[in-house]
Image (cartoon, helix red, strand yellow):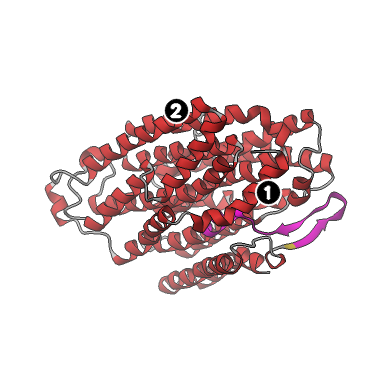
Amino acid sequence: MITTATIFIPLLGAILVLLLRGDERLVRYAALGVAAVPLLLALYIYLAFGDNLDAPALSQELVWIESLNIGYRVGLDGIGFGMFFLSALLALIAVVASWDIRENLGFYFALLFLAEVGMLGVFASRDLVLFYVFFEITLIPMYLMVGMWGDENRRAAAIKFFIYTFLGSTAMLAGFLALGVLSGTFSIPELGEEAGGLSRAAQIAIAVPVLFGLLIKVPAVPLHGWLLDVYVSSPISTNVVLSGVLPKLGTFGILKIAIPLLPEGVEPFLPYLAVLGVVNVIYGAFVAFLQPDLKALVAYSSIGTLGFILLGAASVNAVGYNGAVFQQVAHGLYSALLFLLVGIIAARTGTRRISELGGLAARMPWAGGLLALGALAAMGLPGLAVFVSEFMSIMGGYTAYPVQGVLAALGIILSAMYMLYMLARVIFGPLREPAYERVGDAGAVEMAAVVPLAALLLVLGFFPALLISVQRPAVEAVLAAIGGS
């Protein structure tokens, strides 16, 4: 029951903060306490079952619609556990990062907890219908959080987010229904055991809408139109979840469902998936370089590094697949860190425009230093988690697609160029404005939000086996089932 408890405790938290609204201080500390519980349970699961995530104690099954073999089926494996843990961590950090929100605080936390239920549920789902239900549960809270607490463009951004993701969800659901009905079951483990059971033509017909829906969520260029407005218009605490977890609902679907359950259907599209990954890397780097807004630069940087996940997944070999799974977590850590630091800098200086910033390292040594760490992580510097995952994704991608692998490596150079340019303009050099002399560094609450992310980037950079040893058995099982190398 521990998996189910971890998923649904945030729902109890949502009810609790709604009941407590009116006493802002009590709501904050109640939200903090509730958000800590799923993280502690996820940590316990890692310590107790890290090398045995298939243990029966972590799985629950309850048949819901017997004639279609649809049920409540949850469990954990190495492909989803890293993001399961990260979802719980980022929800707690988002609560801390929401400390300055005053308007409808209880409702905001309730939406955040509801989104956490959806995120945790997606990464633990073992049923296609349940996966879709949890996938959809994340949409409405995110739509409301962007639309109610964002900047002046929040409504347009929220509507665009809803339209894109609803279109993707509909396409994905059509594919899931076809797969489940034709196979006689919606159980993901049962479908995995019969991987390739359907004809090649049927698999291709199903793979098209499934991949389309998941690639919108990634977002893969050119299906990324929703991302910039949503990221730029959202409050920083929402950015933590939006950038750290939401795109991984798409990449996780590709790694856990599309490729393992439809191997012959996805196989013709794998080269194009690798090309899309490289396009994301190159496009994200060039467009990020042109952004005058610090938050927009981080948003496009996020698009670029997501491309490594697509390249690693398309390689369908052990190195690339493990790199893609690892990159999901590494990307979530660094993108959430950078968005938090952008929020801190904007709150102190009153601007996010890169041309109006400069020399902040002297006044904000902790925030400036951590911004540099996050930027170095985004460049893939050795010793940080992103280096491990990008290196593995590129090596795996190069083995399967040499040209795409070389171009993806070029993307690392490009990302280094724009990140160094950003650091030179924002934190180094003389103070751009005399008023910045009075700017203070990150406070204790802000440091409590960013330090865990920075620490994990370092820990996983120096000790990647802490995560790879957990994910490797599940990756090997997928590759063995579909005939990967």
Instruction: Indicate the quadrant containing the C terminus: top left, top right, bottom left or bottom right.
Output: top right
Residue 209 pos. (x, y %): 68, 33
| Mark 2 lies on residue | 407
> Residue at coordinates 68% horizontally, 33% vertically from top-left?
266
Residue at the outermost right position: 67
Tell which circle, 1 or 2, labels the residue nearer the N-terminal end.
Answer: 2
Instruction: Indicate the quadrant containing the N terminus: top left, top right, bottom left or bottom right.
Output: bottom right
Inspect the image, locate mark 1, and give the three-letter code of the amino acid beneath it. Answer: Ala
The span shown in magenta is 61-87
- Secondary structure, mark 2, is helix
How crowded pointer 2 is (Cα within 10 Å; few <14, some 14-19, many 20+) is rated as some
The reply to whether residue 163 is in sight is: no
Determine which quarter of the picture holds residue 52.
bottom right
Determine which quarter of the picture holds residue 2.
bottom right
Inspect the image, locate mark 2, and give the three-letter code of the amino acid beneath it. Answer: Leu
Q: CA distance from mark 1 to mark 2?
A: 29 Å
